[in-house]
Image: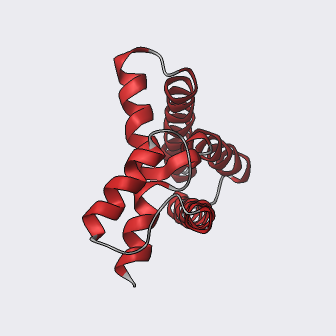
Amino acid sequence: MAKKKRRYKKRKTASKLDIAVVILIVVSILLAVLIYTKSGMVGQKLNEIFGGMFGIIQYVLPIGIFVIAIKIASNGNEDLNPKLIQYAVFLFSLCVLFSLFQIAAGEIRTNGELSEIVSEAYSIGTQSKGGGAIRSCCCCATK
């Protein structure tokens, strides 16, 4: 009697998911080392860029990516894109919250040219304060 060939479709999808999880973990550890220690030229430049864009939220970025990777690894069948979109919305909300605190404190002005406001928010963000240039760009454009 001939044996039926087995197909291993689950292994292929599991290996793609495993690769995505490993890449997310490596990226989060690399970002954590570069951002928290500010080591080398790459770390200093990354700290300046992420600080200017996200402000103090740059320190939450590697932790969130690591948590997403662990969540996907533990639940195996979840898709990667919805989790990353939820995390991006969460980061944007935090940026807005911290920038509103800066506006209330008077550190960022809300009148004037958009480019001046964004560059001012970027320079404050490089000092690891507030929400960075992303929030300023979105909130001042709606005004």
Horizontal and vertical percent position of residue 8: 53, 48
Between residues 24 and 104, which one lies in front from this camera angle? 104
Write down the quadrant of residue 111 in the picture: bottom left
The residue at the far right in this view is 74
* In the depicted structure, whether residue 46 falls above or below residue 80: above
Residue drawn at x 41%, y 25% as measured from the top left = 44
Horizontal and vertical percent position of residue 80: 53, 57
The residue at the far front in this view is 106
Horizontal and vertical percent position of residue 38: 49, 22
Write down the quadrant of residue 62 in the picture: top right
* In the depicted structure, whether residue 116 falls above or below residue 25: below
Residue 132: tell me if it is visible.
Answer: yes
Write down the quadrant of residue 141 in the picture: bottom left
The residue at the far bottom in this view is 143
Between residues 77 and 135, which one lies in front from this camera angle? 135
Between residues 34 and 124, which one lies in front from this camera angle? 124
Residue drawn at x 62%, y 62% as measured from the top left = 105
Residue 7: tell me if it is visible.
Answer: no
